[in-house]
Image (tube, rainbow, N blue to C red):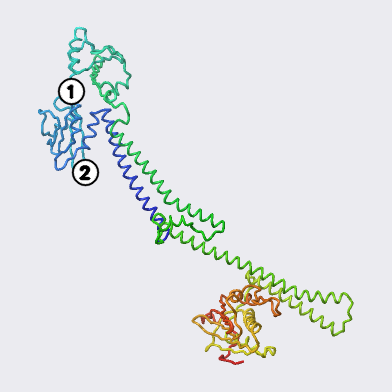
Amino acid sequence: MKLQRRIAFHFSIQFIILFVSVFFFFIFLFILVANLMTKIELNANTADGLVDTIPSMVAIEKDEVTLDEKWSKLLKENDMWMQIIDKNGYVIYSEHAPQSLKQDYTINELLLIEESREVEHYPVQTYYDSWMSSKYYFLFGFQHNYKEMLGEWFATYSHQGMVDKQELSALEKKLKPINGFIQIFKKGELIQSIGTDDNEKLSHLELIGRIYEPGKHATKVNVYNDPTSEVSWVLHLPGKENQKPAWLFSSQEMQILLIAISISLLITIIFSVWNGYRYGRPLLLFVNWLERMGEERYDEVLTEKEKKKVFKKKGKTRHRYRLYQEVFQSFYSMADKLTKAEQERTRLEQSREEWMAGISHDLRTPLSTIQGYGHMLESNQYDFSAQELQEIGKVIREKGDYMMQLVNDFSLVFQLKNRGITLEKRIVEINQFVRKTVMKFEKDLTLSKVSFLFAGTNREVYVQLDPKWFMRVLDNIIYNAIKHNPPNTKIMVRLLQEEEKVKILIQDDGQGMDEEFIQNLFERYYRGINTNEKVEGTGLGMSIAKAIVGLHDGEIQVTSTLGKGTTVAISLATFRGSERWNKFKPIDRMNVGVIFC
């Protein structure tokens, strides 16, 4: 698996694990918060809370009802009962219901209950459940009808809305068993308190709050209003305020929530540390390597201590670093390339110094000759004959020509290096082109001690090249074979066709070259001989030849053995395609074969 895919895979797996963990944590948190909200609602108004909660907590399957025992206890603690009625009006489940209640109801009876909110003399609250495909009707009743009882007391003990003194003791006896007291309000003013010495006047919403949220106050209230006398009797009964926990986290649910948050925070910290350890440690190794690279210590990708951390004894990458094994391999490869580049730079620097030394020598020698003759002529101490003056002029001209050739070759080398020369390519029949070049050397009378041999291909082969520049390549190579070999050397030029390429082989049976000579042969201004030796030429011929072959998208290679000779091979792509052929006018063609010169 590639590095990019492996990293993507690792981070995808981590993301999925993190997503699943967070998802389940939030589900757990949601359920916990829902339970907490339910409990808070139950504490605020237990009766309404039970009416809203129990239908969702009841499990009904084929009219078989299952209810947790804690809900049954809550109903009993709050003096409530419950009946569940199916779609046909039958009671399928009862909890703490009085025996006097019916076990089935007609439509009229259910409609009456819904309107009056009473069953017999019991006040009720209803809930209609249509979850899924089943439908059920819940009746939640209260064992004591305090509102009805308060109305009876009003009718018995009230005199113009108030209780006379002679009736107070009787009413207080009624209040004592239920531990309650009554406040009487008329036109918004508290006019009488019965069963308590507390004459505190409650604000409008404080009194309403004790009706809606009895669990949050010291008392819960029931009210009887008499429109005739404009009097309201308010019955206060003990509430559950004192039963609430004093500390916020004392409840089991809140403790679970606190533990869940702590565990999540701990897991997050551990995950962050693990990620930093897993992905950070390799980065530290890379930073150390880059520092060593900046100090040019390319051979130290990893120290011995670091290698033991990264690799096992058998050389395999340890699991914690396996994600970056391609990176380590790339670093080793880069270090190797940088080492070779440094060695190459050193070699090129040495070659440059040798090149400059050779150039200085080759320029100094003709300049010394010219300078010497100039002093002799300037001193006027010698009487030169006309013939001697002509000879001096000839030497000065030849040295000047040599220097001009050297300067031109320098300029050409840099133009070739920067691709400052534009080739004018033509389609050329390579057999004829190479043969004409060889014949040019054969006809040179100064080369009578060198024999030439040319062997072409069996059929015509065409290539695209610039005749002028490629002629110079062949001239330089053949001239080197003549110049650096003893007399009677045989030079053979052969052409070989290989698939879509053609090879030009220039072979000689001369003295050959060693490996160092071959490696430096194409260096600019490398002769491979002592610069004190008198050899014609600028020493840039092979460098120029290689650059020109490169401009033709070709390759040039040299093989040689000391004492046995040298072979220079030039490889060029052949020209193919009859449709393109008509666009060019080739050089006149001729029959080729093996020619002994």
Q: Give the quarter of the figure containing the C terminus.
A: bottom right
Q: Marks 2 and 1, how far apart in space?
A: 35 Å
The residue that appears at 87% across and 74% down in the rendered structure is: 378
Q: Quadrant of residue 442?
A: bottom right
Q: Residues within 10 Å of mark 2 (few under 14, many from 20)?
A: few
Side of 230 where 350 appears, left or right: right
Residue 180 versus residue 64 in the image, above or below: above
Q: Which residue is at the front of the view, 165 or 152?
A: 165
x, y (%) of residue 467? 62, 81
Q: Amino acid at mark 2?
A: Met
x, y (%) of residue 64? 14, 40
In the rendered image, the residue lying farthest to the bottom is 596
Q: Which residue is mark 1?
A: 145
Q: Which residue is at the front of the view, 491 or 163?
A: 491
Side of 446 where 170 appears, left or right: left
Q: Secondary structure at mark 2?
A: loop
The residue that appears at 38% across and 45% down in the rendered structure is: 270
Q: Give the quarter of the figure containing the N terminus.
A: bottom left
For the question of whether residue 116 can be seen, the reply is: no
Q: What is the number of callouts on the image?
A: 2
Residue 11 versus residue 208 in the image, above or below: below
Side of 389 where 294 appears, left or right: left
Q: Residues within 10 Å of mark 1 (few under 14, many from 20)?
A: some
Q: Amino acid at mark 1?
A: Asn
The numbered mark at residue 132 is: 2
x, y (%) of residue 557? 56, 78
